[in-house]
DNA sequence: TCAAGACATGTCAAACTCTACATGCAACTT
DNA sequence: AAGTTGCATGTAGAGTTTGACATGTCTTGA
């Protein structure tokens, strides 16, 4: 039920088309949720059917702009205040770290390097957003407006990305030290010192060894 | 394809039953991935079918313990080094923050308080894990073993939880100040000062006003 | 003027995930 | 001896998500 509410929530800020929403899911709310257009268009149809949104404008190339209705606003508020969030978060990138001991140190290092790069880029992007918001906000800040909350939300993103960037850099150092210690000047290509727990070899049906005293 | 690889990765560390895996997804790797037993058992059957795992022991109550095969290890390594991670992460809890401007400040505050509580609990849990690992590790640390990587992985979790806990506490303060400034001693129950963008009222089919000069 | 690229909407099938249903054993407590 | 809880495996159906297919418009630059 989250996509539905995400769409309603985004439309509360301003009327948008399915295309706009798709881009929002790739940009502003990426990192929190994602959805492709093939999911969004049917959802918009359902929401309109239910009277939670309404088409309020048409644009070039068949563009359809939807706005939230009173019922839609009530719905999204109800969701926010009356339901418990699903606090399970999912991140394949993080899960992979659990398994990095299975690969060559150089591969693990490379993985961490890319993670660092990724978080660095995200951080830069969010900091730019924050700078924009801080500038906009120069006059009397609106009291309880989306812009104020955007800043608070972006702050979460910034802190999150910064933390994971720092962690990745720290982990890279750990791997470097580990490799230096382990190799001790020698050139060793071994992947894992302590091998994973494998199943014993399959029982052979016939044994080539003849039973010869 | 992530559940499949998650299962293989976990079995690389030690042989486990479907039940064990289910608990792992609720505990150690929760926060990175989740899966219920109804997903895990069919997956184990498929993996065995493909020869990536093998049943190596039976236990009480029909317990079946699976181990990784050589092919399974090759598969999970291949996945780790040769495929790009899906870096989209998903968190309903974070997404909700984007929409908190839609609800009463007291409700937003309450939401943040619960988030803080949640992250605090996770942090405590991970710090206990870290302490255990640090103790275990007291002697000569194994060079490239799962335990060493567990510590690195747990470190990511700790930093992540700490960051989000601190953010939630900071955001709570922001809301408190905002409310104090906005209410300025008066008792006001208004939800949003700047209303969301709603669709204009539906066009009525007949107009009660007669067209009278 | 023509081609490429961004804008824009939609459908469908396959894969994945969740909830509920279903069953039974083993250990511990009363 | 009976009841409760935790261990343990499985299936079915509904809902969610992805990736591929499909189509057409508008703008910009060569």
Image (cartoon, coloured by chain):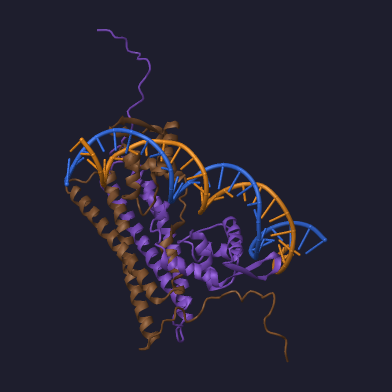
Chain colours: A brown, B purple, C orange, D blue
* Most distant residue in the bottom direction: A213
* Observer-nearest of D5 and B95: B95
Judge whether residue A97 can be spotted in this image: yes
Q: Quadrant of residue A16?
A: top left
- For the C terminus of chain B, the image quarter is top left
* Observer-nearest of A109 and A190: A190
Residue B80 falls left or right of residue A151: right
Residue B152 in picture, x, y percent from top left: 41, 73
Residue in the image at 46% along x and 73% along y: A102
Can you say whether B183 is above or below B28 in the image? Answer: above
Q: Quadrant of residue A170?
A: bottom left
* Observer-nearest of D14 and A62: A62
Residue in the image at 45% along x and 86% along y: B140
* Observer-nearest of B74 and B100: B74
Residue B114 in picture, x, y percent from top left: 42, 55
Residue B48 falls left or right of residue A183: right
Residue B200 in picture, x, y percent from top left: 32, 28
């Amino acid at each position: 039920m989250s996509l539905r509410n995400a769409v309603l929530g985004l439309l509360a800020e301003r009327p948008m088309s399915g295309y706009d929403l798709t881009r929002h899911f790739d940009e502003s709310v990426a990192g929190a949720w994602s959805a492709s257009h093939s999911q969004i268009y049917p959802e918009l149809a359902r929401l309109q059917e239910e009277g939670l949104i309404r088409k309020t404008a048409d644009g070039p190339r068949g563009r359809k702009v939807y706005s939230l209705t009173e019922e839609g606003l009530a719905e999204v508020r109800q969701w926010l205040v009356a339901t418990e969030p699903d606090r399970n978060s999912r991140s394949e990138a993080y899960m992979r770290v659990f398994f990095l001991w299975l690969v060559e140190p150089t591969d693990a290092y490379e993985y961490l390097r890319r993670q660092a790069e990724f978080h660095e880029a995200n951080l830069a992007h969010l900091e730019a957003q924050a700078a924009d918001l801080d500038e906009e906000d120069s006059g009397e800040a609106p009291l309880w407006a989306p812009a104020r909350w955007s800043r608070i939300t972006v702050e979460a993103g910034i802190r999150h990305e910064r933390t994971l960037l720092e962690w990745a850099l720290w982990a890279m150092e750990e791997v470097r030290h580990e490799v230096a210690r382990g190799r001790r000047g020698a050139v060793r290509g071994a992947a894992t010192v302590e091998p994973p727990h494998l199943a014993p070899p399959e029982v052979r049906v016939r044994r080539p060894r003849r039973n010869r005293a």
